Amino acid sequence: MDSLNVPLTLEGSYALHQMMRIKWPQWKQTPPAERTEIAAEFAAVLDGMGPTQTGLFSMLGHKGDLMLLHFRRSMDQLNHAELELAATRLWDYLEPTTSYVSVVELGLYDSTARMWRGFQEQGLKPGSDEWKQAQEEELGRQRKAMEPRLYPAIPPHRYNCFYPMDRKRGEEKNWYQVPFHDRNRMMHEHGLVGRKYAEVVRQIITGSIGFDDWEWGVDLFSEDPLWFKKLIYEMRFDEVSAVYALFGSFYVSVRTHADQLAGLLEGRQPER
C-alpha cells in the first residue's frame, strides 16, 4: 500500500470505559451500616484517583447502572486503576456488562496533506530518511501544540454519551480503499458539522484499532443531553456518516461525584 494514502495520527491518554450493573438484591440484603462503609471506601479510592482522570457516571437504561471512565498516560496505569477498584468491597456487588479500551486520537487529514505537499515542494523523497525526519519534527511540534487535547481532563459536564463506531470496509463500500483526497474532503465536511456544536458539546475521540472490537470510541459531554441527539442526527446526513459509518451501542449517563455515591446506591439521583 502507498504510505501516502494513510493519514497520520497523534495519540495521547489511554482510556478505559467500564460499564457495571449493581447486584441490587445482594446489595439490599447488606446491613445499612455496612453499606455505608462499603460506599465510603469506594468513594475514597475514587477521590484518590482525581475527578479529572477517573469519572463516575450513573447510567440510564438496561445496559448498566454505573460507568467508570478513566484517562491515564499509559496502559499500565489504566490496569492499575482497574485493579485498585476491583480490590474494594463494593466490587463484589458489581457485575461488568461491557468495557472499552482505546487511546485519545487526533486524526490529521488536513495536516497530513499540507505536510506532504510541503515536503514534496522541498524535493524530499517519500520514505527517505530526510522525509521521515522532517515528518517526525513536524509531528513533535504538533504534539506539543495539541497536548491539552491529547491528554484531556474529563469534562465537568453533567451528561455523557459514549458510543463505538467503524468505517465500512465491505465489498461495496470500503472506506480504506477511497483515495486520500476524497477521504480528506469528507472528513473536512464532517468536522464542520461538529464545530457548529463546539460551544454546547465537548467531544473526545479515542482510537481502538487493535485495542477493542470497534475502530473508534466517541465521548460527548454536555449540560443538556438533547444536544447529543441534534449533533448526531445532523452528522448522519454528511457523506462520511451516511455512506461509510457503522455505529455500535449508545450509552448515556449522568455525572456522579464520589461524595454522591452513597446516595446513588440508596436510590437517590445525583445532584447538580
Image: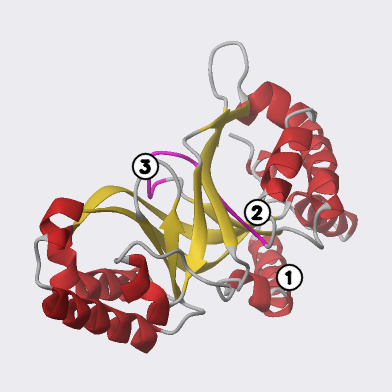
Q: Residues within 10 Å of mark 3 (few under 14, many from 20)?
A: some
Residue 69 spot, x, y in % from top left: 43, 64
Q: For marks 3 and 2, give the CA distance.
A: 35 Å
Classify mark 1: helix, strand or loop.
helix
What amino acid is found at the position of numbered circle 2 in the picture? Leu
**Residue that appears at 49% across and 41% down:** 215
Q: Earlier in the sequence, mark 3 or mark 2?
A: 2
Residue under label 3: 63
Q: Which residues are magenta?
A: 210-222
- Reply yes or no: does residue 214 show up in magenta: yes
Residue 3 spot, x, y in % from top left: 63, 43
Residue under label 1: 138
What amino acid is found at the position of numbered circle 3 in the picture? Lys
Q: Is residue 108 above or below residue 87?
A: above
CB contact under 8 Å: marks 3 and 1: no
Q: For marks 3 and 1, give the CA distance.
A: 43 Å
Pick the front one: 66 or 209: 66
Examine the image and state in which quarter residue 39 appears.
bottom left
**Residue that appears at 38% across and 50% down:** 211
Q: Quadrant of the C terminus?
A: bottom right
Pick the front one: 143 or 186: 186
Q: Residues within 10 Å of mark 2 (few under 14, many from 20)?
A: some
Examine the image and state in which quarter residue 76 appears.
bottom left
Examine the image and state in which quarter residue 209 appears.
top left
Q: Residues within 10 Å of mark 1 (few under 14, many from 20)?
A: few
Q: Quadrant of the N terminus?
A: top right
Q: How is the image coloured?
A: secondary structure
Q: Is residue 208 above or below residue 170?
A: below
Residue 216 spot, x, y in % from top left: 53, 46
What amino acid is found at the position of numbered circle 1 in the picture? Glu
Q: Earlier in the sequence, mark 3 or mark 1?
A: 3
